[in-house]
Amino acid sequence: MKLTSLSALALLSLSGCVNIGGKAVAPVALLTLTAEGGAGTDSARTAPTSETLGVALPLAPQALNVTRIPVYDGSAQITYIKGATWAEVPAALFKSLLIETLSAKTSRLVLDPRAAPLSGGILLSGRLVQFGVDAPTGRAVVIYDALLTRPGGKTVMAHRFQAFAPVGAIEGSTAGRALNQAANDVANQVSEWVRAN
């Protein structure tokens, strides 16, 4: 009896990977974002809590709360590129990219508030407005509305960052590369803004 229960559990755990009896096909490769310049091998840092920078998971519209690449056609309709799948939702990937870029390009100790709760540091939060392909222009578009909150919430600064990159053919690999380029552009803009403030 125990063996049957274990077999059923094993099949259930595999059901997320294999569509038994169906025609669904797993993606050949998952797309991700990679930072142009990482934190490097010697990235050990120490800082007082007032000098830390927390990076919160950006808010995102429902169209971006999936692991697919949206295509904006200029109307109210959004479609997705067939067969193109992110490793995580875009907001999570963009947050990791921001942490990596800010660690490499600012003097601050950059933290994920979920891993190291902040007390007294600066917090970068915001909203990922667009993260997809604009079909009429054939470009990848990344728009991020950032908020920089000083300790105690006494000062809040807001800024919109955006970047575009040519896609070419609207398909998974080309769109993924173009979005990586545009996302890195935005992350670099954010790091310059943080450094200046």
Image (cartoon, rainbow, N blue to C red):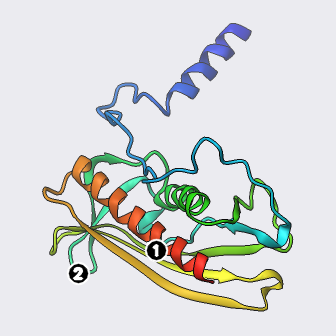
Q: Quadrant of the N terminus?
A: top right
Question: Would you say 164 lies left or right of 35 here?
Answer: left
Q: Residue 189 — which label?
A: 1
Is 81 located above or below residue 61 in the figure?
above
Q: Secondary structure at mark 1?
A: helix
Is 12 located above or below residue 55 in the figure?
above
Locate residue 72, reporting x and y percent: 26, 72
Q: Is residue 108 visible?
A: yes
Q: Nearer the viewer, residue 138 or 19?
A: 138
Q: Quadrant of residue 117?
A: bottom right
Disc 1 residue type? Gln
Is 182 located above or below residue 85 in the figure?
below
Distance Cα–Cα, label 1 vs label 2: 29 Å
Disc 2 residue type? Ser
Residue with the mark numbered 2? 75
Q: Is residue 1 visible?
A: no
